[in-house]
Amino acid sequence: MPAVGSGRGGASGSDTGRLSSRVTCARKRSDVAYITPREVDLQQQRHCALKETGGHPPGGYLAICTTVRNQHAELPEWLDYHRRLGVSHVYVMDDASQPPLEGVLAPYIEEGLVTHRMLKRVPEMQAEIREATCHEPYITHKQLMGYAYCLMDYGVRHQWMAYIDIDEFFVFYDSTPDLPTLLHEYEGYGGLAVNWRMFGSSGHKKKQGNTLRAYTKCFAPNNGENTQIKTIANMQYLARMAGPHDAFYPPGHFTVNPSREPVVGPLSNGADYSRLALHHYAIKSREDFEEKMARGDVMGDRGKLHDFWDRIEAGSVDNCTAGVEMLRRLRRGKGKADKD
């Protein structure tokens, strides 16, 4: 097994496992899709290391990487829900939240579910990612830098890692009991593409206590917005996240949808809800949305325009209760009421 470095690396709740490569950097390329020789070497090391774990990686089978800013109120519900779907660990990459998130995350860190990591200054992160991977074209957005750190420092600790935001919730549309059970069936692929299901406000003006129960008005399946995907990446094959949605792999590996059809890029050829969806609660209540506009987002946009609200509201014409049923399933499985 390749040597794995350990240490806090600015994280709390879990040691890093950064692999290192001395493969010479090729001359600079401006093509974002170009996978550097060093990235290939790191991917191959990760493949070998994970293969030797026999399907029991040291950090747990499935992790989530998410980048947040000032989302204190949303985190507990989102963390509790995905833990119940079989997520082993969550890497919270923090873009200078104020007040600090420690008060919210402390119990999750103590139990070993969460690693909380503060993102550094952009030039410092750019230099560190460049040194580790020889790649730099896309590293201008903090969200993608956070994703790069998740892969570099924690990718060898898990078989799978989902790259999603905390307004997105995995919801099963079949009888699969949890995410690890599903992902075991796709281990030969580079990643699993999960289509968005966009949700509107359902008429709510004020914040609601439970996201999946409160918001039930969503886009029809054939709405083009739902062709956007997020990726659950197989850490044995991931070379780099291409952006917030899709991924790059070495030749011979690729992302598939639940029906095992290849998905190239951030859009699929239609939404595949045969097994699961990623419910995207993009606006929630009017109160939530006003806060979101004031906060901006970690991709660098300084606020959502009001026409975004209008577009999401206009498209939310279907009654979608799969989230409510998911909560019922979890309650039955645990033998206790789900949290509000």
Image (tube, rainbow, N blue to C red):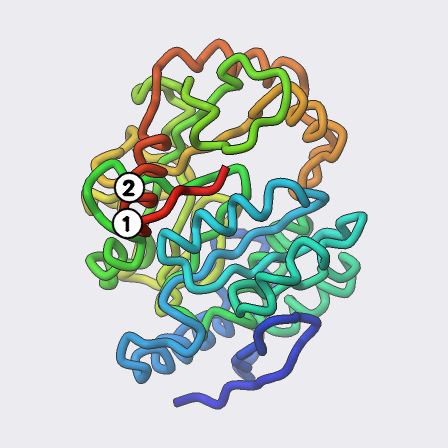
Closer-to-camera residue (253/71): 71
Name the kind of residue labelled 2 in the image: Arg
- Residue indicated by mark 2: 329
Residue 333: numbered disc: 1
Circle 2 — which element?
helix
| Residue pictured at 24% horizontal, 50% vertical | 177
| Residue pictured at 32% horizontal, 82% vertical | 53
CB of mark 2 within 8 Å of CB of mark 1? yes
Please tell me how crowded label 2 is: few (under 14), some (14-19), or many (20+) other residues with Cα within 10 Å.
some
Residue 12: numbered disc: none
Query: In the picture provided, is 127 more to the left or to the right than 156?
Result: right
Circle 1 — which element?
helix
Please tell me how crowded label 1 is: few (under 14), some (14-19), or many (20+) other residues with Cα within 10 Å.
few
Query: In the picture provided, is 36 more to the left or to the right than 146?
Result: left
| Residue pictured at 42% horizontal, 39% vertical | 266
Closer-to-camera residue (212/241): 212
Query: In the picture provided, is 20 more to the left or to the right than 49?
Result: right
Q: Dividing the image into 4 quarters, which one contains the N terminus?
A: bottom left
How far apart marks 2 and 1 lie (CA) works out to 6 Å
- Residue 137 appears in the figure: no
- Give the percent coordinates (x, y) of residue 251: 32, 62
Q: Is residue 101 above or below residue 77?
A: below
Instruction: Using the rendered view, name the quadrant where residue 190 is placed.
Output: bottom left
- Give the percent coordinates (x, y) of residue 285: 59, 21
- Give the percent coordinates (x, y) of residue 211: 50, 32
Q: Is residue 289 above or below residue 160?
A: above
| Residue pictured at 36% horizontal, 57% vertical | 86
Name the kind of residue labelled 1 in the image: Gly
- Give the percent coordinates (x, y) of residue 273: 26, 34
Q: Is residue 331 above or below residue 149?
A: above
